[in-house]
Image (tube, coloured by chain):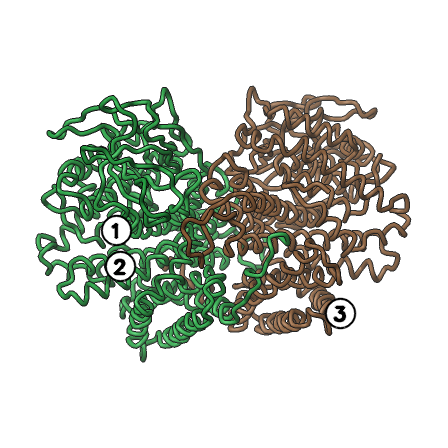
Chain colours: A green, B brown
Amino acid sequence: MRSSTVLSRRDLDFLLHEWLQVETLIKRPRYAEHSRETFDAVLDLAEEIATEHFAPHNRTADENEPRMVDGKVVLIPEVAAALKVFTEAGLMAGEFDEAYGGMQLPHTVGQAVFAWFKAANVGTSSYPFLTMANARLLLTHGSEEQKRTYVGPMVEGRWFGTMALSEPQAGSSLADITTRAEPQDDGTYRLTGNKMWISAGDHELTENIVHLVLAKIPGGPAGVKGISLFVVPKFLVDDDGSLGERNDVVLAGLNHKMGYRGTTNTLLNFGEGVHTPGGRAGAVGYLVGEPHRGLTYMFHMMNEARIGVGMGATVLGYTGFLHALEYAKTRTQGRPAAAKDPAAAPVRIIEHPDVRRMLLAAKSYAEGGLALGLYCARLVDEEQTAEDAADRARAHLLLDTLTPIAKAWPSQWGPVADDLAIQVHGGYGYTRDYPVEQFYRDNRLNPIHEGTNGIQALDLLGRKVVAQGGEGLRLLVEAIRATTARAAGTGWSDFAADLDAAVERLAAVTATLWGTGDAELALANASAYLEAAGHLVVAWLWLEQALATGTATSDFHEGKRVAARYFHRWELPKVHVQFDLLESLDRTVLDTAESWL
Amino acid sequence: MRSSTVLSRRDLDFLLHEWLQVETLIKRPRYAEHSRETFDAVLDLAEEIATEHFAPHNRTADENEPRMVDGKVVLIPEVAAALKVFTEAGLMAGEFDEAYGGMQLPHTVGQAVFAWFKAANVGTSSYPFLTMANARLLLTHGSEEQKRTYVGPMVEGRWFGTMALSEPQAGSSLADITTRAEPQDDGTYRLTGNKMWISAGDHELTENIVHLVLAKIPGGPAGVKGISLFVVPKFLVDDDGSLGERNDVVLAGLNHKMGYRGTTNTLLNFGEGVHTPGGRAGAVGYLVGEPHRGLTYMFHMMNEARIGVGMGATVLGYTGFLHALEYAKTRTQGRPAAAKDPAAAPVRIIEHPDVRRMLLAAKSYAEGGLALGLYCARLVDEEQTAEDAADRARAHLLLDTLTPIAKAWPSQWGPVADDLAIQVHGGYGYTRDYPVEQFYRDNRLNPIHEGTNGIQALDLLGRKVVAQGGEGLRLLVEAIRATTARAAGTGWSDFAADLDAAVERLAAVTATLWGTGDAELALANASAYLEAAGHLVVAWLWLEQALATGTATSDFHEGKRVAARYFHRWELPKVHVQFDLLESLDRTVLDTAESWL
């Protein structure tokens, strides 16, 4: 197996097969046509296309960010060329139904496949990422006509999709969007408003763009309960699927970011009268599902997107780690600290313990995050295709509970892996001659978008662990204890015991916080709760991986074991600092007056 | 007092006067001409010039990095203009002797003054930073002729200086430099070799550039004991101080960095025969001090530079914090987590506890780092001007012990303050329309240059805490215990008790590590030791600051107290995770085989 600095196929195979046993999914009707061979083939294809068509223009796209020329977005040509190869290989369709030309891949495999593209070039990969999420949302909540009209062209890669949620004054707080959707006599709507931070919001990559737009229908309830979801295509679509009039969606500006520059990020104006479909003002939109339920539908997609953001953060950290590992094996510098002979030849820097510490830490974050992302994907497969309804419900609730962690943990620690990757490179890592500084900049977006990590913390502590009487948390604790029970009597019993102790505290602290009956106090330190829960969950998945190595003695399996030991000894203990703080119901932050800052 | 987003004069006044009592220095002969009024005047001047001449082109310099045109460095004109104002105001001369036209400011005040420039524009401030360090080194170790020839023009700002240490193959490991210095009959040397990462290595800002270059005289001992230091001017200087022939120092290339772009960073070739002074090959160099003692002299400067790097990291975090604070006070978004009315108006984001948490954390890192930097500067003043020799020796040893912490701690946590500043800004913070992303990129250099943080860890644990039988560590512990003793019986006794417990462990862990008699094992986890020691030291300085607030009740003083509480409750406990690990003599990293990674 060739080695890659993009991502590790060996690790993916371990996670998919030695650990998550994805081949067992083949027994289910939806995946009956699949086999280990088909999974391998699509992973081979992904690696090849990501390596040969996505990775090579990652730096070029960073250096030549999208420009607006005569109202149109100009991208470097490599982006369109790579996406053409991607869609022609059928990869956009990977997880979709055969009816749409898809392969009906399990989501677990689909995530592993797509991880190659995010790792190779997160900017270019955003276009299909958003398109697939858009298509999946329409498949779940759209009308038959909407599915017929929009999903096919997106799965084929002829049209791309967006998610148009935020506005300049309403990012985290979608309740405050002001985009209006006026109902028309023909059942359509006319939208007016401005949308901000819209990735892939405009470009010439495809002949049409399908925007999914949140807007308020006048007269609806205030806040999040008055938000509806609309399909707003850039070009209206005639009954036969051909493109008609230009809709009134206008590119108003591009955002210039620190990283993630390959992805066009736009300010879009809807219904400003630049174009007037049918001679009337307003962008034409089609209601998805029922009025006022838009945020519910969107959250379905956003949960998926959040796990996807976590995966992106992980694999950006992962590729940083692999680059640093390669560098550390070749760069020579200095001698062992205890060496006495100044005339001895310099050693490769991987021989310095502190460099191995940095690599080991980065490995534990990158591989730990990847395990988390694929575990969540496995839950999606359970949720959607498990035979037993109770199993599906259990997977759904566990996934719901894990989602804020799956978004926030990798987006906190993936960037740390990239930070360590720079540090391993020394001064060279700080230059633009090496790729790690770009990974670091690209990855910095992840704690912000798809719900900031602070919002994930409120979601976890304020909603997820209390929903259904705490059933989600109970399921999580049960899952972790099942693992620690398996570890008893193995060489991992110490790790299991420490994990059990931490889980005990998670449950106790949750009870303490909500036992106050004071939501403001309970939620004040939610970020510490999220961080502790995240570290605990990843420690659990490291124990899972350690157990999955069994008695195998290859270097690869030893690597899994040493990273598990690292996480057990260096990382897991950190949760107690956070649990101590939470248990004390510390009011420092809550009681800080603005004027003191 | 006007408020600034560059730096806080109020905080500087607190640290200098309410805490460090710098006015007491006026009793010493060197500072006898000074007064609170002269200190205030120079700080006023620094704030004004930094704000009006340095800050405005910080982004411009980032967007227009130095270019090489026809072998010369082209900078945006604002750099030269700002530096002209700086030197004409006499700020380059601030700390120097009156004999050189200097103000003889205490170093503590000088550091506070210079902090304004680093915070406003770290790129432009590098030129005077390096020049001052260069001049100070020559004043300490240079001959009378070298002082006469080079120091005056540098203090006047007519010439700038550099430090040319690293080579492409020798960054951290200076023992491996290959630049040669051949002695000549006239007592000069001819240098040949390539120097990498030379900041301010070439430019047209001044008529001459004074390089301090490490090189090996053939026949000297191997390793660091065979390195000598040379003055190598860009233009040779005639006896009357006028410029003579071009020396053979040639700009070979510019490094393109992620941040810190305003500072020209160069690859310089010495003695490649492009110029041939006196018709002979080699760059003309003048030995500083004795042969083979170059690294000792350079370390004198590097210790100063390390504290300076820490100060730079701190104030870059500080300005990030101030920008985030201003943003949080004006940007509205969302409602309190416990609020029920969706029609209520959105609140300013500072009203969200998690935003206050981020601001409080950033404040504790930025102000804590500033306290550390100024405390070290105060030790420099003690070391140089205390009346009693024992006091000078004590200050010297304590400073020596603290130096790796003063470099590494702010360069770890200053970037975290900037990371939090981005997060407070949300998506806007990730764009180049706001300054915080640049602070984050700029600050990422600091854990790398002037000795990576991994090297600081080896310096602290491998040298500083064991030097002179552990006397440096004993002095540090004594200083901390003096503070905790003062805190007994105050409202800060809990903090003091926790700090005492942590200090106890620092001493015990140090003994345990070295008690193994196994240097490789003792040093394997040195980074954890450095991080714990750093957090402990900054916790101590937060207790110092808390005590210095006395009974004052202003918002400013409340702010100091709440940041001290934050550091006590949220940050100090982290050290125990590291002490536990160190105490266990964990071998995970040490025993990790390269092939497992």
**Camera-side residue: B327 or A371?**
B327
The label number, if any, that marks residue B302 in the structure image: none
Give the spatial CA distance, label 3 vs label 2: 56 Å
Give the spatial CA distance, label 1 vs label 2: 10 Å
Q: Which residue is mark 3?
A: B486
Tell me, yes or no, whether the two marked residues, 1 and 2, touch with CB atoms within 8 Å: yes
Answer with the quarter of the image where residue A291 lies.
Answer: top left
Q: Is residue B210 left or right of residue A154?
A: right
**Camera-side residue: B497 or A573?**
B497
Total label count? Answer: 3
**Camera-side residue: B389 or A124?**
A124
Q: Residues within 10 Å of mark 1 (few under 14, many from 20)?
A: many
Amino acid at dot 1:
Ala
Q: Is residue B239 left or right of residue B359?
A: right
Give the SS element for disc 1. helix
Answer with the quarter of the image where residue A52 lies.
Answer: top left
The percent position of residue B366, horizontal first and vertical second, equals: 62, 51
Tell me, yes or no, whether the two marked residues, 1 and 3, touch with CB atoms within 8 Å: no
Give the SS element for disc 3. helix
Amino acid at dot 3:
Arg
Q: Earlier in the sequence, mark 1 or mark 2?
A: 2
The label number, if any, that marks residue A112 in the structure image: 1
Q: Which residue is mark 2?
A: A15
Q: Is residue A446 visible?
A: yes
